Amino acid sequence: MKKLWILILLILGASVTIIAQSEILIPVSTQNSDLIFKAGDDNRLYQAYFGQKLLQTPESDAFPRPDHIAYITSGTDDLFEPAIRITHNDGNPSLELNYVSHETEKQGDNVTITHIRLKDPQYPVVVILHFKAYYLENVIEQQVEIIHQEKQPVMLYNYASFMMHFDASAYWLTQFHGDWAEEMKMQESELTSGIKIIDSKLGTRAHMYQTPVFMLSLNERSDENHGELIAGTLGWSGNFRFLFEIDENNSLRVISGINPYASEYSLEPGRSFITPSFVFTYSNQGKGLASRNLHKWAVKYGVMDGGQPRYTLLNNWETTYFNFNEEKLIALLDDTKKMGLDLFLLDDGWFANKYPRDNDRAGLGDWQENKAKLPNGLGVLTREAENRNVKFGIWIEPEMVNPKSELYEKHPDWILKLPNRPEHYYRNQLVLDLTNPQVQDFVFNVADGLMTHYPDIAFFKWDCNRMMTNAYSPYLKNKQSHLYIDYVNGLYKVLDRFRQKYPHVPMMLCSGGGGRVDYGALRYFTEFWASDNTDPLERVYIQWGYSYFFPALSVCNHITSWGKQSIKFRTDVAMMGKMGFDIQVNELSDKELTFCQDAVKNYKRLSDVIWRGDLYRLISPYAEDRAVLMYVNGGKDKALLFSYTLNPRFGESFNVVRLQGLDPVKTYAVQEINQFPGIRNILSGKSLYTGDYLMNVGLTVSSSLPLTSTVIEITAE
Ligand code: DGJ
């Protein structure tokens, strides 16, 4: 009867609150997965089930003995890692959480929000688990909110966004790690008894050494099309921690959230502490489906303006570095036009006068045009861009300061640095104290000031070239352990303000390479710079790594001269994501220029398939001396295949590749594009095949010559 009433209320669009009576099941469901909690008759909240969608939601007496408390507290009877640890204002270091109530609400047709309210029976501390389930995309976001009404602040030590239990025979963890210019190296290993932690303590960014993403396969390793797994990532642009603990029964608990390292947080009565979102998806058809789920979710909900087009661009970083003037830049505007690109992006080096930004040792913080390089200001460039019908974008790094700058001289108290210790530099710079509202205003004004003076600015690249070391905030005084959290929240406040005023100006997120990408920041950014390493051979691996979690339209790939491979190889590699150029256009031969112009046209024609199509990773560069992947659009009438031959041994040849994701009964025209005059094609002319043939028999798509590539367009007749 209770169910019937709930159904009627749901149909009427009302939210439902259920007060614990006996045992209650609380499902958080998507099209293909169920996460089911059970409020037990002992008042505790248990995780009853997570996995493949059940045909029917069971009755509440199902799951007779769930062992796993949903959000484990600390200080009482559990001896393993807790999701939450706090000390009450009277010094009691324990917390118990009982189920109180839950509510669900619909946000449109696709999104269901569930709030589960828990409370300590003795203390006025409430913890709310918030879930946002995206039905069609099979993605769930989880956040946790902590509130109390104690007389004095409560100290929070651990405050996970997500906790989940698994009971499998074995657990295989896929993780990604790296460093500057070698991001996203993939590793897979079996978890063993005890704790494994993946974390970062960089302060201003999430990854660089470890990336805040993982895939966890249950029972056995998953491949692209087989295996049961969860893929997850934390939407937080600072320190993160993923903890995996296998207990004496071979049960695994996974705890994800902000890294509690040096981050105990004193929470005032009546204030909410809300954790960042942990975003996850379940797949029982391997890693490929998990990635496609995340991509679909990201394009619709996770990346700013995922449904909008992206600009193709010419960037001047690797072609000029700091050495340019008005004349050179105007020539680059001509090149932008000549190449058929949408936008010219002016990089670092355009600002500062007392300490000119002629290298990375000076000027950061002084955001006025450098008079020697730009005597007529940026206005000339925006006007000249408009005259050529191209857009103009600009680089900023507003969170940072060089000691050699006027900003440093004027506001030493705005800088993160330890008292009584020498300053510690990384790329000759220091981090501004974004916990301080005055600094937040300053950072906002850098971007807002540019937009106000030059409303034609159509794009920003927002850089962040160092992590925190010797971290100490003059503003936070005796609350230093709030620094890592308040810094990121300060940044988000600035970005919120910017987005309120400029909701759609595209912005690239950059951090000395891809060190900052996460879904917390991507709410404000349309794309990110994947790595400073633009050698296409390295890029195949780096882009392959990002593809597990981030959609192609968000991954900026520029064709540069870092690698010495052919222009075709460089272009074809960049084309699998958001393509741009950073190259001396005037040094291209006629054939190369024509090739690039045609490639830009092809890219514009096909970008929707790349940006929003379903990705199938067909051959991994970790498995063979080549990488092959394809994108298929929603209607299965257009697909694009990329094959990159890496460094095969002499005489090595490759098998045919079976395509995926097509319609077996459709007939497809298959044709090689991005052909370079004089380079032998893999396919001759245009051929017709059924989807069935392409997916079961396959095609020869790779040359055995080192550092060559093939791009194949597949179109339903
Ligand atoms: C680091 C970025 O990753 C580069 O692309 C470039 O913008 C430099 N910073 C500029 O200083």
Image: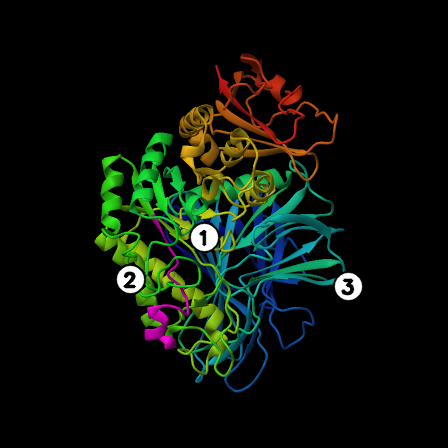
Work out whether residue 401 or residue 12 is closer to the camera in this orientation and state it: 401
Q: Is mark 2 on a helix, strand or loop?
A: helix
Amino acid bearing label 1: Cys
Q: How far, Cα to Cα, is label 2 from label 3?
A: 55 Å
Give the magenta range.
Answer: 394-413
Q: Where is residue 484 in the image (x, y as percent from the top left)?
A: 49, 69
Judging by the rendered image, the residue that carries numbered circle 2 is 445
Q: Is the residue marked by circle 1 packed among few (<14), some (14-19), or many (20+) residues within 10 Å?
A: many
Taking the view exactly as shown, the residue that stands out farthest to the bottom is 90
* Near-viewer residue (403 or 291): 403
Q: Is residue 537 above or below residue 479?
A: above
N-terminal label among 2 and 3: 3
Can the viewer see residue 137? no
Q: Is residue 221 left or right of residue 400?
A: right
Q: Is residue 408 magenta?
A: yes
At 55% from the left and 86% from the top, the residue drawn is 91
Residue 591 sits inside the magenta stretch: no
Please determine whether, in this image, residue 510 is positioned above or below residue 541.
below
Look at the numbered disc 1 and say if its residue's Cβ is closer than 8 Å to ligand 1. yes
Residue type at tag 2 = Asn
Cα–Cα gap, marks 3 and 1:
43 Å
Q: Looking at the image, how many numbered discs can be counted on the residues?
A: 3
Q: Does the residue labelled 2 lie within 8 Å of ligand 1?
A: no
Using a 10 Å C-alpha cutoff, classify the residue at mark 2 as few (fewer than 14 neighbours), some (14 to 19) or many (20 or more).
some
Provide the residue designation for mark 3: 248
Q: Which amino acid does label 3 sit on?
A: Glu
